[in-house]
Image: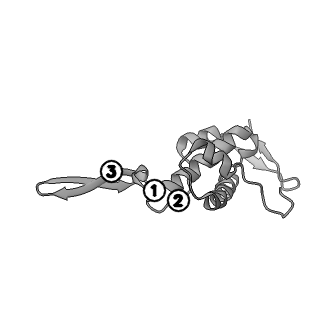
Amino acid sequence: MAEDGKETPFASSDDLKDRWPDLSDTKLADTLLSDASQLIRDTCPGWAHAPEGTLKAIACAMVKRAMIAGSDNAGLSSTQETTGPFSQTWTYSNPTGDLYLTKTEKQRLGQGRQQAFSISMETGTVEEQP
């Protein structure tokens, strides 16, 4: 945990820039990386067991998906244009720029399979069940 009481993000805008050279808004990227890191903590109880590199890569991938939504054709899954008798359809895969984890990312964080676990009320640690 950081000194100001906030959790430290798993990645920085520099990490994202290394993976996505076209990154232009580093201030927004840093904010979204913080949000993505918190989403991982909130939804994946086993996140603390994941390697640091995995957490960094997944946080960056989440933010890139959110930032390309609507900024250019990279966020499109299909398109539509009509000229005379010809048409083409476009659909954004993430039109609102939501942060989310893919099935593969959840698996990398240990969430791909259901597994019983408990959280100690005394220590707050996650205890996996056999």
Answer few, some or many: residues within 10 Å of disc 3's Cα (few below 14, many 20 plus, some between 14 and 19).
few
Amino acid type shown at disc 3: Ser
Work out how far the residue at label 1 is from the one at label 3, CA to CA, in angstroms: 12 Å
Quadrant location, the C terminus:
top right
Horizontal side of 123 relative to 130 (left or right) equals right
Amino acid type shown at disc 2: Asp
Residue at 45% across, 56% down? 94
Amino acid type shown at disc 1: Asn
Quadrant location, the N terminus:
bottom right
Residue 50 seen anywhere in this rendered image of the structure: no
Residue 114, compared with residue 38, is above or below; it is above
Residue at 48% across, 54% down? 68
Residue at 59% across, 42% down? 19
Horizontal side of 85 relative to 76 (left or right) equals left
Work out how far the residue at label 3 is from the one at label 2, CA to CA, in angstroms: 18 Å
Of callouts 3 and 2, which one flags the residue occurring earlier in the amino acid sequence? 3
Badge 1 element: loop
Which is nearer the eye, 123 or 76? Answer: 76
Quick check: marks 3 and 2 in contact, CB under 8 Å? no
Percent coordinates x, y for residue 36 in the rendering: 64, 55
Residue 130, compared with residue 40, is above or below; it is above
- Residue 94 is marked as 1
- Residue 98 is marked as 2
Model colouring: one colour
Residue 57 seen anywhere in this rendered image of the structure: yes
Which residue is tagged 3? Answer: 78
Badge 3 element: strand
Work out how far the residue at label 1 is from the one at label 2, CA to CA, in angstroms: 7 Å
Residue at 78% across, 57% down? 7
Q: Quadrant of residue 31?
A: bottom right
Horizontal side of 124 relative to 89 (left or right) equals right
Answer few, some or many: residues within 10 Å of disc 2's Cα (few below 14, many 20 plus, some between 14 and 19).
some
